[in-house]
C-alpha cells in the first residue's frame, strides 16, 4: 500500500471566468490545412498560426510573443474587507505549428518558448 501524506496546499481563487480567459490566445488565430503568409515587413504573431499540413511563412522579421496587458487596479468586496488586484496579465500567444513548416525571415524574436523547433 502507498503511504498517505498530509500537506498544506495553497489555493488561488480567481473571479468567475478569469482563469478561462487566461488560457485562450487572444491575439487571433490563422488556421487551415495549408497556410502561406508572405509579409514584406514584420509579422507580429500574438495569437496562433496553425496548419494541419504545411505552413509557409516569408517575412522580413517574425515577432512571436504573448500579449501582456496592464490590468490596472481593481477592487473586489470580500468578507471582512476588500481585495485589491493590480499588475499585468500575460495572455498566451505567439504560437506557430504545422506538420511541415517552411520559414524564411531575417530575424525571429520569440518570447516564452513560443517558437520551438522539434524533430527537425
Image (cartoon, rainbow, N blue to C red):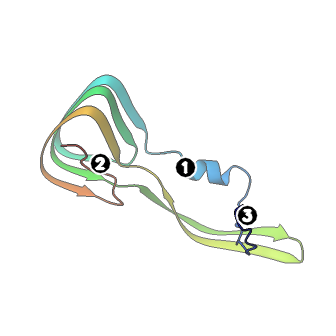
Q: Nearer the viewer, residue 8 or 70?
A: 8
Left or right placement of residue 95 versus residue 91 in this view: left
Question: In which quarter of the view is residue 99 placed?
Answer: top left
Q: Earlier in the sequence, mark 1 or mark 2?
A: 1
Q: Secondary structure at mark 3?
A: loop
User: Residue drawn 66% across and 54% down?
Assistant: 18
**Eyeballing the image, is 109 above or below 83?**
above
Q: Earlier in the sequence, mark 2 or mark 3?
A: 3
Question: Label 1, on which residue?
Answer: 23
Q: Position of residue 77 (x, y in %)?
A: 83, 69
**Direction top: furthest residue:** 33
Q: Residues within 10 Å of mark 3 (few under 14, many from 20)?
A: few
Q: Residues within 10 Å of mark 2 (few under 14, many from 20)?
A: some
**Which one is in front in this view, the residue at disc 1 or the one at disc 2?**
1
Left or right placement of residue 82 versus residue 54 in this view: right
Q: Secondary structure at mark 1?
A: loop
How far apart, in angstroms, are the residues tagged by discs 2 and 3?
33 Å
- Residue 13 numbered tag: 3
Amino acid at each position: 500500500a502507498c503511504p498517505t501524506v498530509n500537506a498544506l496546499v495553497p489555493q488561488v481563487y480567481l473571479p468567475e471566468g478569469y482563469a478561462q480567459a487566461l488560457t485562450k490566445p487572444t491575439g487571433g488565430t490563422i488556421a487551415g490545412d495549408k497556410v502561406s503568409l508572405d509579409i514584406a515587413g514584420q509579422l507580429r504573431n500574438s495569437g496562433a498560426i496553425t496548419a494541419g499540413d504545411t505552413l509557409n511563412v516569408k517575412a522580413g522579421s517574425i515577432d512571436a510573443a504573448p500579449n501582456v496587458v496592464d490590468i490596472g487596479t481593481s477592487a473586489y468586496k470580500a468578507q471582512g474587507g476588500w481585495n485589491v488586484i493590480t499588475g499585468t496579465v500575460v495572455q498566451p500567444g505567439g504560437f506557430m505549428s504545422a506538420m511541415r513548416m517552411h520559414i524564411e525571415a531575417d530575424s525571429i524574436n520569440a518570447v516564452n518558448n513560443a517558437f520551438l523547433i522539434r524533430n527537425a
